[in-house]
Amino acid sequence: LADGVAAPRLTREPFIRVEQIGKRYGSRDGGTVDAVETVSFSIAEGEFVSVVGPSGCGKTTLLKIIGGLLEPSSGTISYGGLEAGRKRPRLGMVFQDAVLLPWRTVLQNVSLPIEVMRRDAAAGVSLARDLIDLVGLKGFEDKYPNELSGGMQQRASIARALVHDPAILLMDEPFGALDAQTRTVLQEEVSRLRRQMNYTVLFITHSVEEAVYLGDRVVVMSRRPGHIKAEIAIPRNAGWRGKEIEDAGNHRDFNEVRRHIWELVRSEIVRE
C-alpha cells in the first residue's frame, strides 16, 4: 500500500469541490479565531471520504459549511461545477445524536423528509418501510424513540437521512455517543449499506480505525486552524473490504495504513 499514501488522482469528475475554504469566528474578547483555513479537496460521486484530526481542528465546521449550515469566511464550494449558493444537491445528514422527534414513531420520523419536501406520501411511506427494513429495524416501525436503544435510534436517523435519495450523505461522528459493541455493529452496517447503494459520503470521525475501515480516502486535518495535512487513498479492493471490523484489524495492510494515519494525527495533538 505504499502507493496509496499520496493523495489519489480522481478517476471521475469531482462531484464536490472545496476550494480554499476558511472560517473565522469572533471571540468574546473582541478578537478572532480561525477554525479552518485554506482547505481544498474534492469528492467524486460514489466516493466515501473519511476526515480525521485532533479535537478542535474544525472537522465539524467543515462539514457544516459543505452542508450549507454555516457560511465560509473565504473560499468556495461547488457541486458539479456550480457554486453552492447557486445550486445545492439533496443532502442527507446524520449527527452524533439521532435527533428524532419524540412524539413521532420510527416510521413517522423516517418519513419526515418526504412530508417536508411534499413528495408523494404513499410512495414515501413505502420507501421509508424499505429503509427501516434495510437498517435492521423491521418490526419497530410503530415504536417511539424512547422505546429504542441508542443504536436503534441512530439506525432510524440513518434511514431518515436516506429516504429522500440524497446526492451526498454527511455524517458527523454518528457513532461517537454509542457503546463500543453497538458502534462496531453500526460500522459494519454502514459498510454494508455503502457496498449495496454506493452512496457519496463525507464522514467525520475521531477514530482512525473507523476512518480506514469505511473510507475510500482518508483526509487528515492539522490542529487549529485546520487545514489538510494529508490525503491517503484506500484501495477499494483492499483485502479487508467486506470483512467484519475485528477481522479487518487482523489484516497486516489495514494495520499499516491505520498506523501511518495515527502517526499523522498524533503529531498534531498539542501536548500540555
Image (cartoon, rainbow, N blue to C red):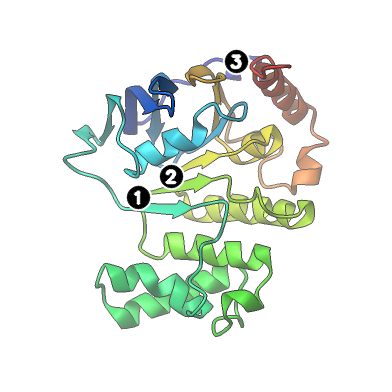
In the rendered structure, find residue 198 and report the number of the disc placed on it.
none
**Sequence order check: which comes first, mark 3 or mark 2?**
3
Looking at the image, residue 249 sits to the left or right of residue 81; the answer is right
Query: Mark 3 falls on what kind of element?
Result: helix
- Mark 2 is surrounded, within 10 Å at the Cα level, by few (under 14), some (14 to 19) or many (20 or more) other residues, namely many
Q: Position of residue 116 (x, y in %)?
A: 29, 69
Camera-side residue of 32 and 8? 32
Q: Are marks 1 and 3 in contact (CB under 8 Å)?
A: no
- Seen at 35% across and 67% down, the residue is 113
Looking at the image, residue 159 sits to the left or right of residue 240; the answer is left
- Seen at 55% across and 56% down, the residue is 193
- Seen at 73% across and 58% down, the residue is 182
Nearer mark to the viewer, of 1 and 3: 1
- Mark 3 is surrounded, within 10 Å at the Cα level, by few (under 14), some (14 to 19) or many (20 or more) other residues, namely few
Q: CA distance from mark 1 to mark 3?
A: 30 Å
Q: Position of residue 188 (x, y in %)?
A: 67, 52
- Seen at 51% across and 33% down, the residue is 59
The amino acid type found where label 1 is placed reads Ala
Q: CA distance from mark 3 to mark 2?
A: 24 Å
Above or below, 230 against 253 in this view is above
Camera-side residue of 91 and 233? 91
Taking the image as drawn, is residue 13 in sight? no
Quarter of the rendering containing residue 207: top right
User: What residue does disc 2 label?
Assistant: 200
Q: Position of residue 43 (x, y in %)?
A: 40, 33
Q: Are marks 2 and 1 in contact (CB under 8 Å)?
A: yes
User: What residue does disc 3 label?
Assistant: 3
Above or below, 116 against 29 in this view is below
The amino acid type found where label 3 is placed reads Asp
The amino acid type found where label 2 is placed reads Thr
User: What residue does disc 1 label?
Assistant: 167
Q: Residue furthest front?
A: 29
